[in-house]
Amino acid sequence: MSGQNRVAINTGAGSGIGRSASLKLAEQGIRVVLVDYDAQLGAESLSLVKESGGEGIFVQADVSKNAEVEKYVATAIETYGSIDVFFNNAGVLGAPALLADQTEEMFDWIISVNLKGVFLGLKHVVKIMEQQQSGVIVNTSSAAGIESCPHLGVYSASKHGVVGLTRTAAVEYGPKGIRINAICPGGVLTNMTKGMEMNNPEQNGPSRRPATPDEIANVVRFLVSDEASYMNGAIIPVDGGLTS
């Protein structure tokens, strides 16, 4: 996909996979609308994009709030006039716990960000892409979205939900010129996973190591390119063989 005149929205852009994806899309000449709840981290990502020669803006938003999702979508249209790529990536991990020990408050928070946030992003972005009769969306699920994940059951449930939304949306909107796929990363060295045993070989499958954010972002860059033009509704493990 040529980046000329293309516009991408990227949620969770303040760090980790979201920051890496922002930089890689900007390298392609795509103008990026960076979205994050943390204004400082988002501003830092935008600075990195501009330092690399890219163009973009930052919008502070809580992806679990309908009005704030409407805001970042409207800002993208007001600023650049289209939304050609949507990396629907923002997510939280939550505190590890057995299901019976997990709090209702933690459940509500994880589901609201990871599942409701993806739903709201899809809801508002596909309306724009439907009018354009074109667009590419990549949702971030997880290896925990295609298998069990002890002590992170609510997170796993939210990411299974992202898989379901992706498959349904791909069928509903594929005929309208919109491709929608999901990536399922395994362990990745990010702020979200800080403090976890990321170098435990048993948690990383045959690769015996966690991924870097760039390794995941490289897959996102491919999926939004014309080289992936026949991929729609795909649920793609990017986990070093963990779920094989």
Image: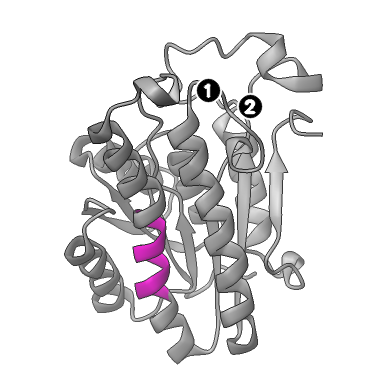
Numbered badge on residue 189: 1
Residue 78 is left or right of residue 161, and the answer is: left
Q: Residue at x 28, y 42 (%)?
A: 108
Please, what secondary structure does the residue beneath circle 2 have? Answer: loop
Q: Residue at x 55, y 83 (%)?
A: 134
Numbered badge on residue 211: 2
Using the image as rendered, state which of residue 158 and residue 241 is in the foreground.
158
Q: Let me know if residue 27 appears in the view.
A: no
Asked if the stretch drawn in magenta spans residue 198, the answer is no
Q: Let me know if residue 3 appears in the view.
A: yes
| Residue 120 locus on image (x, y percent) | 34, 64
Of all residues, the one furthest to the front in this rendering is: 100
Asked if 34 appears above or below 181 in the picture, the reply is: above
Residue 22 is left or right of residue 79, and the answer is: right
Asked if 38 appears above or below 88 in the picture, the reply is: above
| Residue 97 locus on image (x, y percent) | 41, 19
Numbered badge on residue 16: none
Using the image as rendered, state which of residue 115 and residue 122 is in the foreground.
115
Part of the protein shown in magenta: 117-125
Report crowding for label 1: few under 14, some 14 to 19, many 20 or more residues within 10 A (C-alpha). Answer: some
Asked if the stretch drawn in magenta spans residue 121, the answer is yes
**Dominant SS type (magenta):** helix
* Label 2–label 1 contact, CB within 8 A: yes
Please, what secondary structure does the residue beneath circle 1 have? Answer: loop
Looking at the rendered structure, the kind of residue marked 1 is Leu
State which quadrant residue 59 falls in.
Answer: bottom left
Residue 221 is left or right of residue 106, and the answer is: right
Report crowding for label 2: few under 14, some 14 to 19, many 20 or more residues within 10 A (C-alpha). Answer: many
Q: Exactly how many numbered labels are in the figure?
A: 2
Looking at the rendered structure, the kind of residue marked 2 is Ala
Asked if 16 appears above or below 230 in the picture, the reply is: above
Q: Residue at x 59, y 42 (%)?
A: 145
